[in-house]
């Protein structure tokens, strides 16, 4: 998973997900996207307002379970918050 963040002029944080066809079938891509939405909804209180967050999913994420995906996203968000 690759993380890219940038500031925006909005009050609430915004999320974008890039899940290419290389990740798998439409069912697989949508499952990963739904998991990412759930993880980001959990992390929402800890994210500062006005942040625009884009998460690009790599093909290896297709074989990743929810707990590992969640840990990766949280680690990336914490790393970005401390920078």
Image (cartoon, rainbow, N blue to C red):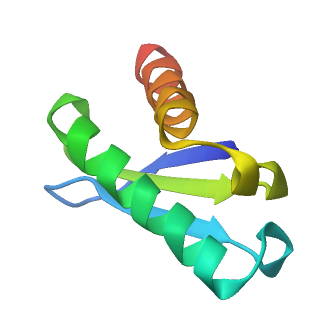
State the image coordinates of residue 41 (x, y, percent, origin top left).
24, 49
Q: Give the residue displayed 75% in from the left and 75% down from the top.
A: 20
| Left or right side of 78 for 68 | right
In terms of image quadrants, where is residue 49? Answer: top left
Q: Give the residue displayed 73% in from the left and 82% down from the top.
A: 25
In terms of image quadrants, where is residue 43? Answer: top left
Residue 29 lies, with reference to residue 25, above or below; the image says above
**Quarter holding the N terminus?**
top right
Residue 39 lies, with reference to residue 32, above or below; the image says above
Q: Give the residue displayed 14% in from the left and 35% down from the top.
A: 45
| Left or right side of 68 for 59 | right
| Left or right side of 56 for 16 | left
Q: Give the residue displayed 46% in from the left and 35% down from the top.
A: 70
In terms of image quadrants, where is residue 8? Answer: bottom left
Front-lying residue, 54 or 59:
59
Question: Can you name the residue that lies furthest to the top here?
Answer: 82
Front-lying residue, 54 or 75:
75
State the image coordinates of residue 4 (x, y, percent, origin top left).
61, 47
State the image coordinates of residue 40 (x, y, percent, origin top left).
33, 47
Total number of numbered discs in the rendering: 0
Front-lying residue, 77 or 8:
77
């Amino acid at each position: 998973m690759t993380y890219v963040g940038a500031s925006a002029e909005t009050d609430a944080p915004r999320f974008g997900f890039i899940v290419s066809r290389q990740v798998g079938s439409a069912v697989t891509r949508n499952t990963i996207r739904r998991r990412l939405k759930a993880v980001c909804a959990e992390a929402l209180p800890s994210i500062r307002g006005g942040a625009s967050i884009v998460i690009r999913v790599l093909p290896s994420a297709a074989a990743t379970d929810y707990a590992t995906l969640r840990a990766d996203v949280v680690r990336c968000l914490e790393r970005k918050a401390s920078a």
